[in-house]
Amino acid sequence: MSTPLLTGRRLFKAHGSTPALRGASVELHPGEILAVTGASGSGKSTLLHCLAGIVRPDEGTVEYAGERLDEASEARLGELRRTEFGVVFQFGQLIPELTAVDNVALPLLLAGTPRQAARERAIAWLERFGVRGQEALRPGEMSGGQAQRVSLARALVTGPKVVFADEPTGALDSLSGEQVMTALTHTAREAATAVLLITHDAQVAAYADREVTLRDGVLAAEAAEVAR
Amino acid sequence: MSTRHVLLGLLAAGPSHGYDLKRRHDEQFPQARPLAYGQVYTTLQRLVRDGLAEVEGTDSEGGPERTLYRSTDAGAHELTRWAGEVMPPAPFVTNEIFAKVVVSILASGDPAAYLTAQRAAHMARMRELTAVKTAPGTDLATALSADYALNHLDADLRWMTTTAARLTTLTAEVDSA
Ligand SMILES: Nc1ncnc2c1ncn2[C@@H]1O[C@H](COP(=O)(O)OP(=O)(O)O)[C@@H](O)[C@H]1O
Ligand SMILES: [Mg+2]
C-alpha cells in the first residue's frame, strides 16, 4: 500500500458534553475513494470536519501530506481549503446570490485566477457535469440534482487532492443521486483525487473502493479489536 | 434453508426429541413451511449417521416412548462453521441469512461477527454491480438488472444493520422463548 495522504490518529472530539469522536483512526490513500458509513449520530460529520481542518480535534493528530493539520494556523488551513481540498455537503454550500457559473468560478478567483479564465474553466466543468445551459441560473432556480452537480463542479474546479463529501446525495432521489455519484467518482478516478465520502446509504457507499463504519465515535473494526 | 443446521442449533440448547424439535422449529421460523415430522426424523438419522448427533436415551413420561437426541462435539463444531460461513451475495438469500443469525443466537454463537463478514461480502458485490451499472455506454437491460440486484442486496443490508443494532434485545427474546 502507498503512504496515506491523510491520516487521523486516535481522534477525540466532544461538542459540549456530548462525545462525538472517541479515539477514531482513519487513513485515506492518494486517489482512494473511501466511504465512511454508520448510524446517525455515530460521528461521521465530526470526523470529516476534523480531517478537513474545519474543526480541531480535542485529542489526536491529523496529518495531511506530512503536515500536522491539528497544529496548523487558521491561515494555513484556509489556504489548504482553497487549494488542496474541496467540500460537498448535503446542501447549502452554494451562494444563493451568485449564478451557477459564478459559484463555480469563485474558488478560482479567490486563488488569483484572472476573471475570464476562471469563467471559461467554470463553464467547462459545468459542461462536464451535464449542467451546461444552466450557467446563468441561481441555486434557487435549479433542481436539487442540478444544484448538487454545480456544487461538485465547484469542489473540483481547483483540482484538489482530496474531496470531502458529507451525504452529497442525502436530499436527492435515486436517479439524481446516481448522476451525482457517477460524476463525482468518474472525475475523481480520472484525476486521481482522493474522496472521503460520508453516507448512511449502502448504494452510495458502493461507489467507493473501501468502506469503514463508525460506531459511537470509533471505527467498528477498532471497537471489535478492543473487545477481543 | 438447511434443516440439519437448524436442528443442530435447536439441540445446542440441550437434548430434545423429534416432536419437540418440530414444534420449536415452527415457532422459531414462523415464515417457513412447518417441518414434516418425517423430515425431522430422517434428518436426525442422518445427523447420527454423520456423528453430529447421538441418542441420549428414551423418555416416556406417561405417553409413548420417545427417543432423545443430543448434539455431539462434532455437531457443535459443524454448527459454528455453518453459522459463520458467508453466503454468496445473490438476491433472495435472506432466508438463509435470517436462519444463520437466529441459529447463532440459539447456539450462543457470534452473530455480530457473522453480520460484519456478510456485510463485507454484500458490499463487495454491490461495488461490482455499481461499476457495471455506471460504466460508460452500459445498455438499459444491464442497468436495470444491476439496479434490481442492488436494491435486493441493499434490503438485506438494511435488515442486517437493524439486526446488528437490535442484537442485544433479540438475544434476550430467543433465550426466554
Ligand atoms: N454542533 C454540535 N453541538 C452539539 N452536539 C453536536 C454538534 N454536532 C454534533 N453533535 C453531536 O455529536 C454526535 C456526533 O454527531 P455527528 O458527527 O454529526 O454524527 P453523524 O454525522 O454520524 O450523524 C451526535 O451525538 C451529535 O448529536
Ligand atoms: Mg452527519
Image (tube, coloured by chain):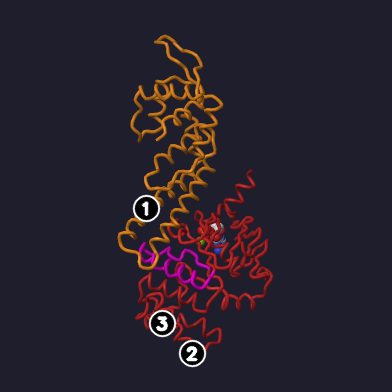
Chain colours: A red, B orange
Q: On the picture, is A228 further left or further right than B98? A: right
Q: Looking at the image, which residue sits at the far top?
A: B62
Identify the chain of the residue marked 1, using the numbered disc in the image.
B
* Element assignment for label 1: helix
Q: Decide: marks 3, 2 in contact (CB < 8 A)?
A: no
Q: Is residue B87 above or below residue B43?
A: below
Protein chain holding label 2: A
Nearest to the observer: residue A139 or residue B49: B49
Task: Assess whether mark 1 and mark 2 are in contact (beta carbons under 8 angstroms).
Answer: no
**Most prominent secondary structure in the magenta stretch?**
helix
Mark 3 or 2: the one toward you? 2
Q: Residue A177, can we see it?
A: no
Residue designated by label 2 = A115
Give the label, 2 or 1, closer to the camera: 1
Badge 3: how crowded within 10 Å, few (<14), some, or many (20+)? some
Q: How far is the residue under mark 3 from the one under mark 2? A: 15 Å
Are marks 2 and 1 in one subunit?
no
Indicate the position of residue A212 as horizontal and vertical percent values. Answer: 54, 56
* Amino acid type at mark 2: Arg
Query: Mark 1 = which residue?
Result: B149
Q: Residues within 10 Å of mark 2 (few under 14, many from 20)?
A: few
Which residue in the protein does label 3 denote? A99
Picture coordinates of residue A175, whole percent (x, y): 35, 64
Q: Quadrant of residue A74?
A: bottom right
Across and down, in percent, residue B173 comes to: 47, 34
Q: How crowded is the residue under tag 1: few (<14 C-alpha within 10 Å), some, or many (20+)? A: some
